[in-house]
Amino acid sequence: SDETWGIVINEAMASGLVIFSSKNAGASSILVKDNINGHVFDPDNVDELVKLFDSVLDGQINLEKMKMNSKKIISEFDSGKVSNIILEAVKSVRCI
């Protein structure tokens, strides 16, 4: 099943964590950048998930860099910036 957004992704990124997210979480398509701050996986593909975790265990993934990237990406979604985006959208609909 799909989760509309998946606020836990925002929370994890704000805490500076690497994100491994199901493609079913809406936030994954916007916030998770493969090989940048985490990976998006198909929850119905067990082999894909096993390969992902094997690459972590083998040290093929730079977790420290991904942690920093998570904080950087989520910092662009602070409440002030989001509020301004919403306000501009409302203004454009009202033709102000």
Image (cartoon, rainbow, N blue to C red):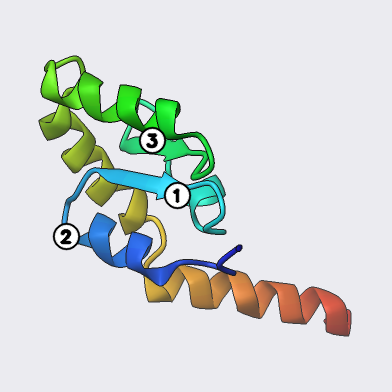
Residue at the spot 40% in from the left edge and 70% down from the top edge: 7
Q: Nearer the viewer, residue 22 or 62?
A: 22
Residue displayed at 42% across by 43% down? 32
Which residue is tagged 3?
Answer: 39
Name the disc covering residue 55, or none. none
Distance between the alpha carbons at the discs numbered 3 and 1: 10 Å
Q: Which residue is mark 1?
A: 31
Residue at 68% from the left image edge and 73% from the top image edge: 88
The residues tagged by marks 2 and 3 sit, at their Cα atoms, a distance apart of: 17 Å
| Label 2 secondary element | loop
How many numbered marks does the figure carry? 3
Task: Report the amino acid beneath label 3.
Answer: His
Q: Amino acid at mark 1?
A: Leu
> Which picture quadrant has residue 80?
bottom left
Sequence-wise first label, 2 or 3: 2
Which residue is identified by label 2? 15
* Mark 2 residue type: Ser
As drawn, is 24 to the left or to the right of 61? right
